[in-house]
Image (cartoon, rainbow, N blue to C red):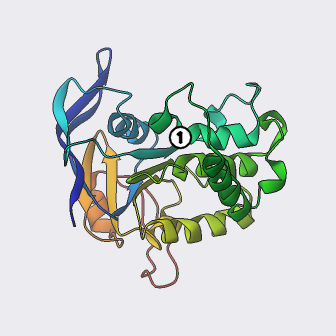
């Protein structure tokens, strides 16, 4: 498969605090990468680098082809300003701004696509409502529609299983499995057991990044990655219960 983007020896700091050191990562077409790691280990910082909102002080981000790959982003819903007066439909359509520009007028085909996505996510009935009074689960559905309306090459999700209802949590990964047929996906999650059942590869981020070319990760490998997580998985993935390690 072709490479979408590559991080080479990337190091990132906030003022004098270095949060990522010498990170190497290759993202290919139709990859499904699960990013795990402890709080404060640099997972969200890694996403910011890939999104282009944060520049490293060392290393480079290389896009393949003549143009950078297009990226859809689903942020954590607790970071969304719910006081901003905007309707659900307008939020979904705003995912086209990178293609059309901030002041572009949306065509009937754009609105049709937005309506179809909202119908698929079960939020069509909310299309004219203001986002201020909606639940976390409803917001996740809305912002997932926004993230994929432009048919990006890469979809990035930051803790998508936080603040959602249990019904949508199960549906979410079914949706992601289908989307992965046409786009690469990077998902950050604390729910290691769940993502291991869906992702193809795993990256453990704890100041640096250790890449594992599989969705099965052992206690010994987590120790080597210095990734202090407990893991319990079910189904086709072998059961493992891991102790905390230094």
Q: Position of residue 113 (x, y in %)?
A: 62, 55
Q: Residue furthest front?
A: 108
Residue sitting at x 65%, y 58%: 117
Q: Nearer the viewer, residue 151 or 107?
A: 107
- Say above or below: 55 vs 152: above
Residue sitting at x 35%, y 73%: 216
Residue sitting at x 57%, y 24%: 103
- Say above or below: 230 vs 238: above
Q: Nearer the viewer, residue 104 or 38?
A: 104
Q: Position of residue 71 (x, y in %)?
A: 41, 45
65 relative position to 36: left or right: left
Q: Is residue 162 visible?
A: no
Question: Which picture quadrant has residue 67?
Answer: top left
Q: Position of residue 232 (x, y in %)?
A: 50, 70
Q: Nearer the viewer, residue 83 or 239?
A: 83
Q: Quadrant of the N terminus?
A: bottom left
Q: Residues within 10 Å of mark 1 (few under 14, many from 20)?
A: many
Q: Nearer the viewer, residue 39 or 127?
A: 127
Q: How many marks?
A: 1
Q: Is residue 203 visible?
A: yes
Q: Residue furthest top?
A: 15
Residue at mark 1: 96
Q: Position of residue 115 (x, y in %)?
A: 71, 54
Kind of element beneath mark 1: helix
17 relative position to 90: left or right: left
């Amino acid at each position: 498969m072709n490479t979408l983007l590559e991080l080479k020896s990337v190091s990132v700091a906030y003022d004098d605090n270095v949060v990522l050191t010498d990170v190497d990562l290759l993202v290919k077409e139709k990859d499904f990468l699960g990013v795990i790691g402890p709080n404060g280990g640099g997972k969200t910082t890694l996403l910011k680098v890939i999104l282009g909102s944060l520049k490293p002080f060392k290393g480079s981000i290389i896009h393949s082809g003549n143009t950078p790959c297009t990226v859809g982003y689903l942020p954590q819903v607790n970071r969304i300003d719910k006081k901003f007066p905007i309707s659900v439909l307008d939020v979904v359509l705003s995912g086209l701004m990178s293609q059309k520009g901030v002041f572009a007028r949306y065509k009937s085909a754009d609105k049709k696509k937005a309506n179809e996505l909202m119908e698929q996510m079960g939020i069509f009935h909310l299309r004219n409502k203001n986002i201020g009074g909606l639940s976390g689960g409803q917001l996740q559905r809305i912002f997932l529609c926004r993230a994929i309306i432009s048919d990006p090459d890469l979809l990035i999700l930051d803790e998508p299983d936080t603040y959602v209802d249990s019904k949508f949590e199960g549906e979410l990964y079914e949706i992601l499995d289908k989307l992965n047929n046409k786009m690469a996906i990077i998902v950050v999650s604390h729910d290691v057991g769940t993502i291991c059942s869906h992702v193809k590869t795993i990256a453990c981020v704890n100041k640096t990044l250790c890449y594992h070319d599989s969705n099965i990760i052992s206690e010994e490998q987590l120790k080597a990655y210095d990734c202090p997580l407990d893991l319990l998985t079910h189904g086709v993935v072998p059961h493992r219960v891991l102790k905390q390690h230094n």
